[in-house]
Image: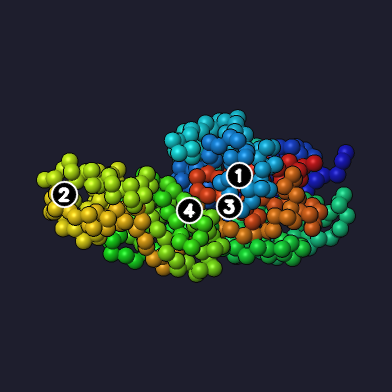
Amino acid sequence: MADQRRVVIVGGGAAGFFAAIACAEKLGANGSVTLYEATAHPLAKVRVSGGGRCNVTHACFEPRELVKRYPRGGRELLGAFHRFQPRDTVEWFAARGVETKAEDDGRMFPVTDDSATIVECLTTAAARAGVTVITSLGVRKVEKLSRAEASPDFWITLTDASTVRCERLLLATGGNKSSAGLVIAEALGHTIVPPVPSLFTFHIDDKRLEGLSGVSVENAATSVPGTKLRESGPLLITHWGLSGPAVLKLSAWGARELAERHYEFPVVVNFSPAHTRDSLVRELSGVREKNLRKQIATWSPLEMPQRLWERWVGASGIDPATPWAQVGNAALGMLATQVTAAEFKVVGKSLFKEEFVTCGGVRLSEVDFRTMESRACPGLFFAGEVLDVDGITGGFNFQSAWTTGWLAGNAMAE
């Protein structure tokens, strides 16, 4: 009988579990798969994703379109998505009894709208495949015992000082600065791109936003002057500033650039992106002619919350009780500027807890994306955010976790 393959997976998140299941299902009785999670709570991010509903993936089934949602890693993921993409994710979960649904914006969730459904599916699949899951025990150090590609060996020291040995090792520890996986990867010869937050909300201290916490706009356009950063999507006003996809996507594409600015920069928001300032002036002029007696603050001609319209009227120096007939051209111009080009000063950030993602990690050129194996250290594999890969909000980060985990898991079993 062939020698038993010993596989160790470090990290009990989405990528780690998916890799463990893929590897154990393929290995069968020909090896063992052990997963170590340093905390007492595996799959923690899966549990909180999407407000507890779990945004499993995104209904984008064309790899060339899909990779456009990744500020970093899109080029490397193109081939990977041809092997395992959102359609495969949907089928994988369906085969294990979990049906999914797509919402209007393309985000996909389990039909139960409960992340526990996904957690239970993964934990059950891991148990059935024979994966040994050990929690509250992490990895402190890894030593490479053999440089031979055919039979690499790793000697692993765990956080309780015990040791284990394996022939295949997967790092799926996430990409934050304290990630043990990055320390181990560097010690085994890899270059680490310094991690910085990728999805975050903007801290803004501006009287125009005071008292509007909870007000949202279905579609807004955001940009950072002096850069190429432009995004659009739903926008949410919070008690600390601005959030929502229009901000989160902007923060993802500008993650490193905005970090270099120490999160202090101007952001311009168009709350009615169908208009430019000039086109809105023309529309408001037409509205004025048809609504001479109506008070300007009591009726908004634009698709935006009434409270927001009232705020822009006041911010333009217009008395809310003023009839449209008495609003001069200069005031209309001020109002159009507030609506289509409101500039705010960002003075800091908050991590978006449901989608905590970093840009940075193991340098991608040092990894073979056909198998997710290290080019520097045979027998070492990577999956998930430990790599310098990150996507915008909407299920894209989970998809890269499923894809890289599936590829690594299958390759480790070969």
Residue drawn at (28%, 46%), measured in percent from left and top?
A: 282
Q: Earlier in the sequence, mark 3 or mark 2?
A: 3
Q: Amino acid at mark 2?
A: Trp
Q: Quadrant of the C terminus?
A: top right
Residue drawn at (77%, 63%), measured in percent from left and top?
A: 189
Q: Secondary structure at mark 2?
A: helix
Disc 2: which residue: 324
Disc 1: which residue: 67
Question: Are there few (<14), some (14-19), or many (20+) residues within 10 Å of tag 1?
Answer: many
CA distance for labels 2 and 1: 48 Å
Disc 3: which residue: 71
Q: Is residue 261 above or below residue 65?
A: below
CA distance for labels 4 and 1: 18 Å
Nearer to us: label 2 or label 1:
2
Foreground: 289 or 195?
A: 289
Disc 4: which residue: 230
- Tag 3–tag 1 contact (CB < 8 Å): no
Q: Amino acid at mark 1?
A: Val
